[in-house]
């Protein structure tokens, strides 16, 4: 079962090397064992108790590519294994980072819900300032006035937008910054002010794209028309 997948464009000097260092730090955290960049730059298999790390590389010619596969069992559910696949590609001075997280159950008898999560290595990349400034969701977008709401209408209908907008109204149950951290690179969180005039919002955005009373509205990109699909909307119970 696929849990998480994402791609990032990296920036800065020696971005590939710094990304490898971030991956090493993540592996050290997961395994509580020593692991260095040179181990990532060679193809090998490493076993740390119940965690397996496999590394592959192709660096003779561009594009230079590195990949890591980390596998470990679920802490609570027998028969379930987690796999994290990481790829780093360096070509022409540009570095791309891809990551995929999935779970594999050894049989249909395995029971237990899969909890969605963002791999910790993504936080390592963000903390290291490796992500490009135009990465989706680097920070929460807070609306402060009428002009911001009108600008949001333009963003909703902007044909070039290729990522979802997560519109959040006043809701004490949602930690906006934490939500954006989980959606880094995937979606942009937009938070409406507490004193939002619901009538103004509906008049500007239409009822379809408005949020109020604790609701969250996920607005997908345009796909050849102006009827932007709404993936999810829910309302907090009072």
Image (cartoon, grey):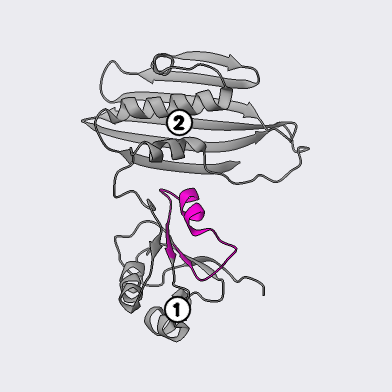
> Separation of disc 1 and disc 2 at Cα?
42 Å
Q: Quadrant location of the C terminus?
A: bottom right
Which residue is found at the position 74% from the left and 34% from the top?
Answer: 107
Q: Quadrant location of the N terminus?
A: top right
* Residue at image mark 2: 86
Q: Position of residue 159 (x, y in %)?
A: 30, 64
Judged from the image, the secondary structure of the residue bearing numbered disc 2 is: strand
Left or right relative to 179: residue 77: right
Which region shows up in magenta? 166-190
Observer-nearest of 202 and 222: 202
Which residue is found at the position 58% from the left and 20% from the top?
Answer: 52
Left or right relative to 158: residue 57: right
* Residue at image mark 1: 196
Which residue is found at the position 43% from the left and 49% from the top?
Answer: 184
Relative to 135, does residue 59 appear above or below in the rendering? above
Relative to 46, does residue 162 appear above or below in the rendering? below
Please tell me which of labels 1 and 2 falls first in the chain.
2
Q: Position of residue 127 (x, y in %)?
A: 40, 39
Q: Counting other residues with Cα less than 10 Å from the Cα at mark 2, is it few (<14), some (14-19), or many (20 or more)? A: many
């Amino acid at each position: 079962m696929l849990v998480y997948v994402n791609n990032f464009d990296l920036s800065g000097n020696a971005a590939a090397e710094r990304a490898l260092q971030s991956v090493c730090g993540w592996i050290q955290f997961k395994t509580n064992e020593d692991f260095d960049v040179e181990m990532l730059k060679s193809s090998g298999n490493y076993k740390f108790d119940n965690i397996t790390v496999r590394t592959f590389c192709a660096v003779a010619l561009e594009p230079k590519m590195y990949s890591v596969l980390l596998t470990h069992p679920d802490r609570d559910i027998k028969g379930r294994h987690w796999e994290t696949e990481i790829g780093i590609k360096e070509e022409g001075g540009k570095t791309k980072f891809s990551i995929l997280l999935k779970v594999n159950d050894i049989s249909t008898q395995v029971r237990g819900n899969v909890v969605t999560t963002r791999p910790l290595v993504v936080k390592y990349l963000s903390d290291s300032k490796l992500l490009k400034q135009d990465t989706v969701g680097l920070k929460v977008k807070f609306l402060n006035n009428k002009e911001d709401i009108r600008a949001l209408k333009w963003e909703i209908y902007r044909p070039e937008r290729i990522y979802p907008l997560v519109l959040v109204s006043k809701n004490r149950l949602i930690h906006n910054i934490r939500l954006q951290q989980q959606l880094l690179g995937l979606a942009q969180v937009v938070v409406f002010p507490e004193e939002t005039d619901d009538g103004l919002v509906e008049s500007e955005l239409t009822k379809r794209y408005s949020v109020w009373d604790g609701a969250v509205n996920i607005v997908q990109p345009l796909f050849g028309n102006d009827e932007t699909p709404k993936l999810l909307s829910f309302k907090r119970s009072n």
